[in-house]
Image (cartoon, rainbow, N blue to C red):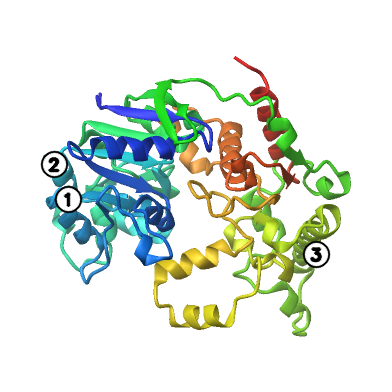
């Protein structure tokens, strides 16, 4: 059993979790070392006090972010740790930490604050089935009773084709599920290397991270935040309480037009598997260019093109005719592989680039600034977007997904009888997404959710938040 000091700060989006974290670091910066972990580079700039005007940057926490300087960000991270600096980094970099990183974190007694639940279990896409079969048949690896990949020491050497897999296995990160695929998991000992870890999120019990904690018997306690002085953004931790908001129903206007919703009136429609079977992904071809290319298309492909265009047309109808929203108020999502084919000119970007911006972007003078600026003027927002305020002016939303957890990840958790609720997982995803919008500011939004399942899940949540405890 792993006994650790983990606190889940479970409170609704916009409740003041980040404000609490900033105040906590400010009050303890002379006695504690901090690591702040967030999903996005842009949020690192926020926590570091960076602005577009370099003369006004205010790094009040004396916090540093690892840099790419020849040997990679991990070496930069380890250097900062060795100097006892406060550090801000992304989820992605945290997933790469090695034994040296762990030792430095333990030695310097860091307090870790994690903004949003980590993606602690994912499909590992680095190996094909033929690779897996080769590794097993050559006795390079074996699989234990819980699916962990055990690497035989006699095959360990640098430059090996499967060196990355070797490192992942030796770090207890690589798992085989049902002889079909590999999963990657966060090594659980990471959560036992420091005394204090805070994880700020909403609906933690619906997350993969919660199931992962149960799987590894990692203990945690839950708290919420309450406002003490809203004007000065002062919040304190409190006993955990469920979110209630009697006004939420008046703020979310869900589209109930049957002509727009009937395309997804069954439970599985608009899932990633459904799109794969019924629509054309960006990786196949551009559905507009293929029509004028003269290329012969089989009947099945023609049906897929028709379905893809039908979904796109319903989105356009909702934006232009139902809501009559300008592009700078639009925020929409779909699985990333279908973004281009479901876009039209009215919902790619909120505006055209200026001449100076085109010159600046062409030069790519600052990759992080480039990515941030482009993201801010895009209408498309990833369906798993979290912990960002860049879209809080958007009030016309289209959620074209029907979220389910990967069945192989569910089967992995089932090895130790850890159950997973797909509907709660889907609810958490859509709530996180809609709270990137003007809803975060307490302003009304219009929302198109054609999936009948996702729509009902969200409506049930709205009804529950109306009820005072």
Residue 66 is left or right of residue 433, and the answer is left
Q: Nearer the viewer, residue 21 or 335?
A: 21
| Vertical side of 245 occupied by 258: above or below | below
Label 1 packing within 10 angstroms: few (<14), some (14-19), many (20+): many
Q: Nearer the viewer, mark 3 or mark 1?
A: 1
Q: Earlier in the sequence, mark 3 or mark 1?
A: 1
Q: What residue is at 22 percent from the left and 66 percent from the top?
A: 160
Q: Evaluate whether residue 174 shows in this view.
A: no
The alpha-carbon separation of the residues under discs 3 and 1 comes to 55 Å
Secondary structure beneath label 2: loop
Q: Position of residue 124 (x, y in %)?
A: 40, 53
| Tag 1 near tag 2, CB within 8 Å | yes
Secondary structure beneath label 3: helix
Label 3 packing within 10 angstroms: few (<14), some (14-19), many (20+): some
Q: Quadrant of residue 198?
A: top left
Residue 241 is left or right of residue 416, and the answer is right
Residue sitting farthest toward the top: 469
Q: Position of residue 223 (x, y in %)?
A: 41, 24
Tell me the number on the disc at residue 81: 1
Q: Nearer the viewer, residue 178 or 390?
A: 390
Q: What residue is at 32 percent from the left and 52 percent from the top?
A: 89
Q: Evaluate whether residue 163 shows in this view.
A: yes
Secondary structure beneath label 1: helix
The alpha-carbon separation of the residues under discs 1 and 2 comes to 8 Å
Q: Nearer the viewer, residue 361 or 283?
A: 361
Q: Position of residue 158 (x, y in %)?
A: 17, 65
Label 2 packing within 10 angstroms: few (<14), some (14-19), many (20+): some
Q: Earlier in the sequence, mark 1 or mark 2?
A: 1
In the rendered image, which residue does mark 2 sit on?
108
Tell me the number on the disc at residue 306: 3
């Amino acid at each position: 059993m792993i006994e650790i000091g983990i606190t889940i700060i479970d409170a609704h989006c916009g409740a003041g979790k980040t404000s609490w974290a900033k105040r906590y670091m400010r009050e303890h910066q002379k006695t504690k070392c901090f690591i702040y972990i967030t999903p996005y580079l842009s949020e690192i700039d926020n926590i570091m006090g960076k602005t577009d005007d370099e003369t006004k940057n205010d790094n009040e926490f004396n916090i540093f972010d690892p840099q790419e300087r020849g040997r990679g960000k991990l070496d930069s991270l380890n250097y900062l740790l060795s100097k006892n600096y406060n550090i801000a980094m992304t989820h992605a970099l945290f997933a790469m930490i090695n034994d040296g990183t762990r030792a430095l974190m333990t030695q310097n007694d860091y307090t870790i604050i994690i903004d949003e639940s980590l993606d602690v279990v994912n499909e590992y896409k680095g190996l094909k089935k033929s690779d897996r079969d080769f590794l097993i048949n050559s006795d390079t690896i074996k699989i234990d009773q819980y699916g962990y990949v055990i690497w035989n020491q006699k095959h360990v050497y640098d430059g090996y084709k499967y060196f990355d897999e070797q490192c992942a296995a030796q770090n207890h990160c690589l798992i085989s599920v049902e002889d079909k695929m590999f999963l990657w998991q966060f090594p659980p000992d990471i959560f036992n290397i420091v005394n204090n870890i805070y994880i700020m999120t909403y609906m933690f019990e619906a997350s993969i991270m919660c199931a992962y904690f149960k799987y590894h018997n990692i203990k945690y306690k839950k708290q919420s935040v309450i406002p003490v002085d809203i004007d000065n953004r002062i919040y304190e931790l409190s006993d955990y309480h469920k979110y209630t908001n009697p006004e939420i129903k008046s703020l979310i206007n869900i589209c109930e037009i049957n002509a727009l919703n009937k395309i997804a009136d069954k439970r599985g429609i608009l899932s990633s598997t459904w799109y794969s079977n019924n629509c054309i992904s960006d990786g196949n071809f551009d559905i507009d260019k293929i029509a004028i290319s003269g290329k012969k298309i089989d009947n099945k492909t023609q049906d897929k093109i028709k379905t893809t265009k039908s979904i796109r047309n319903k989105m356009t109808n909702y934006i232009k005719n139902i809501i009559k929203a300008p592009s700078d108020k639009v925020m929409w999502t779909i699985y990333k592989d279908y973004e281009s084919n479901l876009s039209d000119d009215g919902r790619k970007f909120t505006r055209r680039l200026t001449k100076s911006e085109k010159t600046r972007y062409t030069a790519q003078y600052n990759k992080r600034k480039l990515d941030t600026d482009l993201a801010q003027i895009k209408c498309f927002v990833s369906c798993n977007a979290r912990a960002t305020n860049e879209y809080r002016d958007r009030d016309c939303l289209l959620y074209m997904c029907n979220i389910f957890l990967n069945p192989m990840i569910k089967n992995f958790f089932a090895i130790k009888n850890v159950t997973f609720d797909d509907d709660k997982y889907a609810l958490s995803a859509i709530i996180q997404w809609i709270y990137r919008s003007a809803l975060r500011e307490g302003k009304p939004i219009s929302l198109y959710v054609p999936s009948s399942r996702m729509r009902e899940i969200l409506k049930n949540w709205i009804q529950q938040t109306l009820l005072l405890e």
